[in-house]
Amino acid sequence: MQQVDIKDKWYVIVNPVAGFGRGLEDLPLITKLIRENEIPHELVFSQHKYHVTELTVQAVNEGYRRIIVIGGDGTLHEVVNGLFIQKAAAVEEVTVAVIPVGTGNDWIRMYGIPTRYSEAIRAISEGYTFLQDVGEVHYEESHYQQVRYMANVAGAGFDPTVTKLYEHYKAKGRRGRHLYAEGSVRSFFRYKSTGVKVWIDGELVHKDLLFSAAIGIGKYNGGGTQQLPLAVADDGLFDITLYRPMHWWQILFRLRRLFNGDIYSIGHVKHYRGSHIRIESTPDIMVEVDGELLGGTPLEFEMHHRCVRVVVNKEYFE
């Protein structure tokens, strides 16, 4: 058998708990399809939180330049952070692909990557790639400044409140795709809008009560909602959506606009773009990044333009 150069071999990271264990359950089928598509690979499993980041650093240090994620948005998030931690190669030298087994799978929607395993793996074998932007997020946790990198969308205010409740449900052993929707409804009636200041590229654009903010590179989060419907993944700019306080009935009768891309027709919702964002609040508000609950304000977002190479569906270019 011909020896495959490590740079041409795919380092496949399996998150066994992604999608409530779906990745592990479906792994025999997934690996069969990978072999049928003659994709040379090395298979590894993550064993704990942030292990995917460690495995990514290890892989690049060993010489791998191709990584497949069998997981969801959170698993991809860890890989992207690993790419920025390692120093063995320029970030853009490593190609990242996703075989989606997560619950939200919001990042793949942006590139038309199919949820059907055979089609997602076909996209990997076809080899169409795209250099996307990445956000650098500075936040505070336990009175220390921390840094994280994001591939898709961050939320401040209401969004991380939902994420926190959703994680609580999962920790209690509850399962099902309905949990995020249930958490959203429960959180809405508990969450109080907060006094927030938002600067975009040095300009103060908001100084008032704020219900929630979405900052991102991609269009989708929260399992298919389009909070940033005009986002472009390689324009070097964050899209920012700010939500002023609304009554429950105002949201209820406009909910479909959150899914059909028409959210900016709502008067309480404002859209901005910029490469540097700062958010301060009194009291502090939480932040989630790519669905991962982090710390809180003050927050700063800085843009890294076209720096992560990802596999996309060929139809994305049509």
Image (tube, helix red, strand yellow):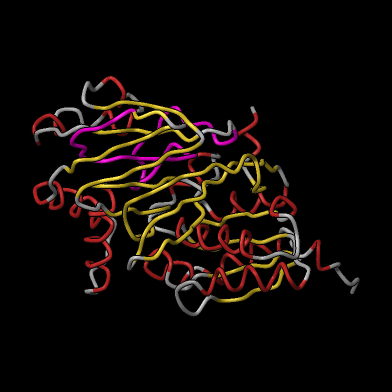
Total marks shown come to 0
* Residue sitting nearer the eye, 13 or 65: 65
Q: Position of residue 258 (x, y in %)?
A: 29, 33
Left or right of 172? Residue 139 is right
192 displayed left or right of 36: left
What residue lies at 56% left-to-right and 76% top-to-bottom? 45
- Does the magenta run of residues contain 206? yes
For residue 280, side relative to residue 239 (left or right) = left
* Quarter of the rendering containing residue 314: top right
**Between 136 and 100, the one nearer to me in the picture:** 136
Q: Quadrant of the N terminus?
A: bottom right
Residue 35: x and y, percent? 70, 65
Q: Which residue is at 39% across, 41% downward?
A: 278
Q: For residue 244: magenta? A: no
Q: Nearer the viewer, residue 73 or 84?
A: 84
Q: Position of residue 104 (x, y in %)?
A: 39, 52
Above/below status of 267 relative to 10: above
Instruction: Look at the picture and state if 33 lies above or below 171.
Output: above
Q: Quadrant of the C terminus?
A: top right
Q: Is residue 141 above or below residue 301?
A: below
Residue at 36% across / 26% down in the picture? 271
Residue 94 in percent (x, y) is at: 71, 56
Report the residue at 58% width, 31% height from top. 235
Q: Residue furthest bottom?
A: 47
Q: Is residue 232 above or below residue 116?
A: above
The region drawn magenta spans 205-234
In the image, farthest residue toward the right: 2
